[in-house]
Amino acid sequence: MKRLSLVLFILVIGLSCKEKKEDKPVDAEPLAKAEEQPPPQEEDWIVLFDGTSFDNWKGYLRDDIPETWKIEDGAMVFYPPEDKPKGESYNLVSKNDYTNFVLSLEWKIAEAGNSGIFWGIKEDEKYGQPYQTGPEIQVLDNEKHPDAKNGTTHQAGSLYDMVAPSEDVTNPVGEWNTCIITIDHNQNKGSVQLNGKEIVAFPLANDAWNEMVSKSKFDGWEGFGKFTTGKIGVQDHGDQVAFRNIKIKEL
């Protein structure tokens, strides 16, 4: 009797386990894993100066870097020579050419100093200086350099001699200024941001541009603003100036 009861007990337990096992459909699939999202892509910036080398730069109309330019504390610094030969200049240009881009950099000017940032430079022996072809965004001590008194189109951040900044947002001399220059020939638009604020906007390579040039000192200059593709440049204007964190994003 005890043996029969034991057999019945085993049968009941077995049936119960089978029912629990069958509660789950045989063809049930495991829960799908949450789809992994790709990491956000970084903006496609090209570093033109990382604070350690002049690898992406050269002197204008030369293959080397003039000795007047030094790397100090992560910046490229221009020291004007005391005995500069007449007619000699020490401008730097990028080794590569660019057409549509956003250029970001920081600049710091010495007291009473003057310099500039160019784009669209055509490097050719017939043009002795970058400013003969490349339009300039002004770098200046607005307080003490005399050019600031020649009108607001000569002040820091201006499209030199053509478009004045909407306001003076420069930091005091000896402090860094962050400048972002956008050149987009597809939209025929250029702009300048200085220290986080857009202060200049202008047309590019169209009738509006030509009219603007005709009212400036560059009227009649053979190559000025004529090259949509060209080099980036920083200017030797005879005063100490520094640039750092230079990068470019092509559009």
Image (cartoon, rainbow, N blue to C red):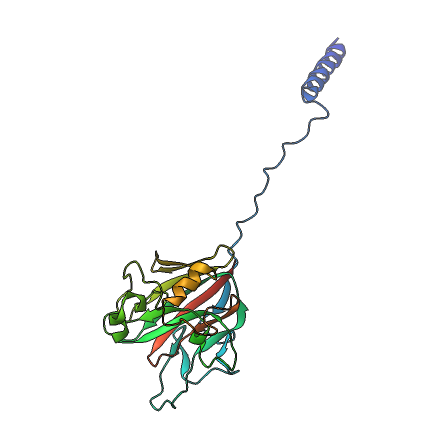
- Is 110 or 114 nearer to us in this picture? 114
The residue that appears at 42% across and 67% down in the rendered structure is 245
Residue 23 is left or right of residue 171, and the answer is right
Is residue 206 shown above or below 70? above
The quarter of the displayed image where residue 217 is located: bottom left
Residue 242 visible in the shown view: yes
Residue 138 is left or right of residue 125, and the answer is left
Q: Position of residue 132 (x, y in %)?
A: 44, 76
The quarter of the displayed image where residue 180 is located: bottom left
Residue 145 visible in the shown view: no
Q: Position of residue 5 (x, y in %)?
A: 73, 10
The residue that appears at 67% across and 19% down in the rendered structure is 23
Is residue 68 shown above or below 106? below
The residue that appears at 36% across and 87% down in the rendered structure is 81
Tell which residue pokes out farthest to the top in this image: 1
Is residue 128 shown above or below 138? below
- Is 217 or 232 nearer to us in this picture? 217
The quarter of the displayed image where residue 33 is located: top right
Q: How many marks?
A: 0
- Is 89 or 63 nearer to us in this picture? 89
- Is 8 or 59 nearer to us in this picture? 59
Q: Quadrant of the N terminus?
A: top right
Q: Position of residue 151 (x, y in %)?
A: 27, 68
Q: Position of residue 240 (x, y in %)?
A: 33, 79
